[in-house]
Structures are given as C-alpha cells and as structure tokens.
Amino acid sequence: MTDKKEMTLFEELLEKSPEIKYPKTNEIVAGTVIKVEKKNILVDLNGQFTGLVIWRELGNTVDLKLVNSGDSIDVMILGDNPERGLMILSLKRANQIKSLNSLNDKFKSEEIITVRPTEANKWGLLVDIDGLKWFIPVSQLTPLHYPRVEWADPSKILEHLEWLLTTEFKVKVINVDEGGKKIIFSEKAAIQGQRTKALEKLKEGDVVEWVVSWILSYGLFVTFDGLEWLVHVSEIDWGHVNDPSKFAKVWMKVKVKVIWLDKEKISLSIKKLQENPWDVLARTYKLNDTIKAPISRISQFGAFVSLEWGIQWLIHLSEISHGVVKNIRDFIKVWEEVEAKIINFEPKIKRIGLSLKALQKAPSKPKPEVKKVENKKDENKKEEKVEKKDSAKKVPAKKAPVKKTPAKKVEKKVEEVKEETK
C-alpha cells in the first residue's frame, strides 16, 4: 500500500511539475543569484539547473559588491560541466546582446545617452561596454573637447584625448552594425539642437560669457552653448599680443562681444569691450606735447616705449640723439622712464612719432674756414706769368701735307713727254 501511495504521489507531482527544458548553447535565460563567492556567481536557472558565472565572464559593467542573493540576472549559456553538474554561464555576453539591442533602439529614436571612454588613440576615444569597444571619432567631438593642436602633432592630440578619459560624454548613436563591431557615437550630434537654438538667439552687438576651450598662438577658442569660435589674436587686446595665454587660461570664463554675425559665421572680440586707447590718447595729448613713458624693449632700429593703455611705439634710432648712435644702450636702458616729444600724431591711423633728441639742445655747428682772397692785380700778374710760360714752350711746326699724284695721271704725263722727244 505504501509503495502504491508513493508512486501515485510521485506521478501527481510529475504531472504538476513544469516541463524540463534543457538550455541551448548561446541562449540567453533568466536566472536568480544563489550566492556570490569571491569572483564567481552561483545562479539558479528556473529551479531545474544550477549555473556558474566565472570572473572572466562577468564583464566590466558589473560590480560584485552590488550583486546579492535573490537578484534576477540574465545570462548566456556557454555549455555545461558534467563533472561538477553545473551549467557554464556568461553575464558579460548576455549584457553585450542586451546593449546592442538597446543601442539599435536608441539609434532609431535618436536618444541621447551618457558614456565614459576607457581608451584613447590618435583617431578618437574608445568606449568599452562588456568587452565591446565602440568609438567616438575626433571629428565627432564638440568644440569644448576637440583637440586644437599646433601643426596637428599626433603625440599632443593623443595627450589631450587621454586627459578626457575621466569625462562623461553626452552622445548620440550615429552608426550601428549587426555584429556590434562598428558602433559610432557623436558628441556633436547630441548638442546640435542646442547649438541651433544658441545661433538663433545670438545677434550682433551681444556681450556673452564664453568659456575658453583652447589657446593657440593665433588666438583663443571660446565656446558657448555648443558654439565655438576663434577670438583672433588681433581682437584680444588693443596692444600687440605676442602670447594669447597671458590673457586667458583654458576653462576660464571670458566676456566676448559679437562684432559680426552671418548665418553660422561669427566674429568675436574681447578688446571691443574697452575704449580704443588711441581715442583716449588723442584726448590726452596733442602734437608737440611731451610724454613720459618707460622703455619696454630695445631693438637695432630703436627703442620701444610702453605708452598708456597698452600702446607700444618705436622711437626710431635717428631720434635718439643728435650725435651718432652706435649702441642705443649707451643712451637708454630697458624700463628707464624717458621724456619724448610728439613730433607726429595721427591717432585715426594709429600712428605717433616720438623723439628724444627734440628735447635735447642741438650742438653748435663749427664755423666754415674763410680763405684769403688776393687782389685782382696780383691775380692778373699771375695769369700773365702763366701765359708767358706757356708761350715760351716750343711747339713743333706742322709739315704741309704732300699731295700724291694718282698713278693714272703719272702714266699719262710720261706718254706726253715721250711724244715731245720724238
């Protein structure tokens, strides 16, 4: 009786129990975490099988500290291990498939996502998600992150990109292939809408706070709401700018004036936020005034003085001293304050002529030597003596030229004489 009851109970349980489905290789199935031990995860598969996720199949998006018993996870079946009675599972590969499917959806919907690059090369940034490496090309970086490098030096481009590895990027998926080998992200595409709105709002004459994104020898690159443009070296300051990095640093906020705008072309200026120093100079000084200023540098052509409001001007070598100037440093030194006279002043064309020697007393000129003039009588006597000497000199007489008789006439004469003698 007991055996019959047990058989009947067993048959009832067998009928009520779910159908046993043996997982297929590369199939993604849902499981429940049984236990996390060291770097492995023990997983229950629908109460029918037990599987193991080893450390190299965890992937880089899983933090074991956040995985607990009872958590539901999706895993891929890699095979089984009959000796241990376990299925071999991969969390990484399951996540790769899920990521690819998700990126396809985001590509179609043009959704903006956040990624963090893990590697860099000279062509761009690599994003590693569970072993799949996806790409942000340099050309798809926003102006704020684009590597502006003198002479396109590859080593400096790479240095700049490596510096961005700790940065989170808002990007759009602009290319996806089925195998997940060529997925391209674009940071530029993610801010295109923002950039368009910023351009629509911007107008000529606006003063906007921009962020310095890069500094090169020819100017400052500044960015604002996805827009980036160059403040040329000539528009940084009214004075001569040799080194733009003396006026700003990267990531520094600067106020910039929009001086010209045409569709997507913009001209920016920092110096136009200040009054033209030549206008101030014209109100302060006039022609023939004396001006005090320090010598900023010395060249072979003269000395440069640092006038007020950042204007640098040359006192030409010829205006240093009345005497011969072989070495300017014998007359003036760098940073010495000097007084100079304004000898030419044309502020509208930004020109001023300065002179040190105009304020110096000119040396007196030596009197010319006066030669004694002799009496006319003495001069006449001298002339007569010279004439006599010249006449005393013997001049050989010229001989009269001998006329030659032509040969034909001589022959004719001879014939005539012969006739006469007959």
Image: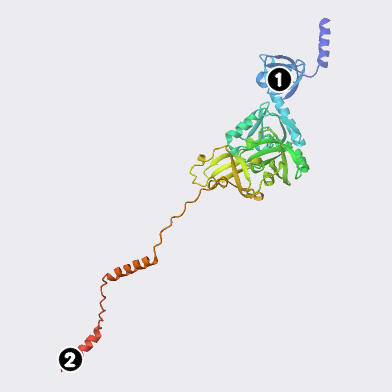
Residue behind mark 1: 63
Marks 1 and 2 close (CB-CB < 8 Å): no
Callout 1: 10 Å neighbours few (<14), some, many (20+)? few
Q: Residue at x 59, y 34 (%)?
A: 156
Q: In which quarter of the image is residue 130?
A: top right
Query: Looking at the image, is 157 positioned above or below residue 12?
Result: below
How far across and down, in percent of the image, does residue 262 sit? 73, 47
Residue behind mark 2: 418
How far across and down, in percent of the image, does residue 208 sit? 74, 39
**Closest to the observer, 369 or 182:** 369
**Closest to the observer, 392 or 74:** 392
How far across and down, in percent of the image, does residue 325 sit? 50, 45
Q: Residue at x 25, y 73 (%)?
A: 396
Q: Distance between the residues labelled 1 and 2?
A: 154 Å
Callout 2: 10 Å neighbours few (<14), some, many (20+)? few
Q: Which residue is drawn at 75% across and 44% down?
A: 205
Q: What residue type is labelled 1?
A: Asp
**Closest to the observer, 8 or 66:** 66
**Closest to the observer, 376 or 401:** 376
Name the quadrant of the N terminus: top right
Query: Farthest residue in the left direction?
Result: 422
How far across and down, in percent of the image, does residue 330 sit? 50, 40
Q: Is mark 1 on a helix, strand or loop?
A: loop
Residue 112 in sight in this render: yes
Q: What residue type is labelled 2?
A: Lys
Number of numbered tags placed on the structure image: 2
Query: Looking at the image, is 157 positioned above or below residue 398?
Result: above
Task: Please report whichever mark, 1 or 2, sits nearer to the chain's N-terminal start.
Answer: 1
Q: In which quarter of the image is residue 44?
A: top right
Q: Which residue is drawn at 82% across and 8% down?
A: 6
